[in-house]
Image (cartoon, rainbow, N blue to C red):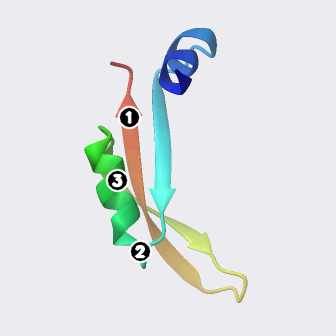
Amino acid sequence: MVLACAFTTAGLDRLEAVHHPDNPASGRVLTKTGFIRTGTCERHADDGTAVAYQVYALPLP
């Protein structure tokens, strides 16, 4: 239902998701639901250190 709304009502052509590198289980959930790993993005933690998050995308079916 949410995917149908995102791709029709909202008119999106892809969804993106990220997960923290210390949580690989989230990456497995994303791939099992059809997301494809596309790379990494750098995000800054509260202490200012950079963390490389894994980036996934789900294209329009």
Q: Which mark is residue 29?
A: 3
Q: Pointer 1: residues within 10 angstroms few (<14), some, or many (20+)?
A: some
Whether residue 36 sits left or right of residue 8 in the image: it is left
Asked if the residue under mark 3 is in contact with the one under mark 2, i.e. CB atoms within 8 Å, the reply is no
Asked if the residue under mark 3 is in contact with the one under mark 1, i.e. CB atoms within 8 Å, the reply is no
The residue where tag 2 is placed is 21
The foreground one among 29 and 43 is 29
Whether residue 35 sits left or right of residue 47 in the image: it is left
Q: Quadrant of the C terminus?
A: top left
Q: Amino acid at mark 2?
A: Pro
Lower sequence index among marks 2 and 3: 2
Q: Which mark is residue 58?
A: 1
Whether residue 50 sits left or right of residue 37 in the image: it is right
**Distance of mark 1 from mark 2, alpha carbons?**
19 Å
Q: Residue furthest front?
A: 1
Q: Amino acid at mark 1?
A: Leu
Residue 37 visible at all: no
Whether residue 30 sits left or right of residue 3 in the image: it is left
Q: Secondary structure beneath disc 3?
A: helix
**Distance of mark 1 from mark 3, alpha carbons?**
13 Å
Residue drawn at x 39%, y 41% as measured from the top left: 57
Q: Pointer 3: residues within 10 angstroms few (<14), some, or many (20+)?
A: few
Lower sequence index among marks 1 and 3: 3
Residue drawn at x 34%, y 53% as measured from the top left: 29
Quadrant of the rendered image containing residue 12: top right
For the residues carrying marks 1 and 3, which lies nearer the camera in this image?
3
Q: Pointer 2: residues within 10 angstroms few (<14), some, or many (20+)?
A: some
Q: Amino acid at mark 3?
A: Val
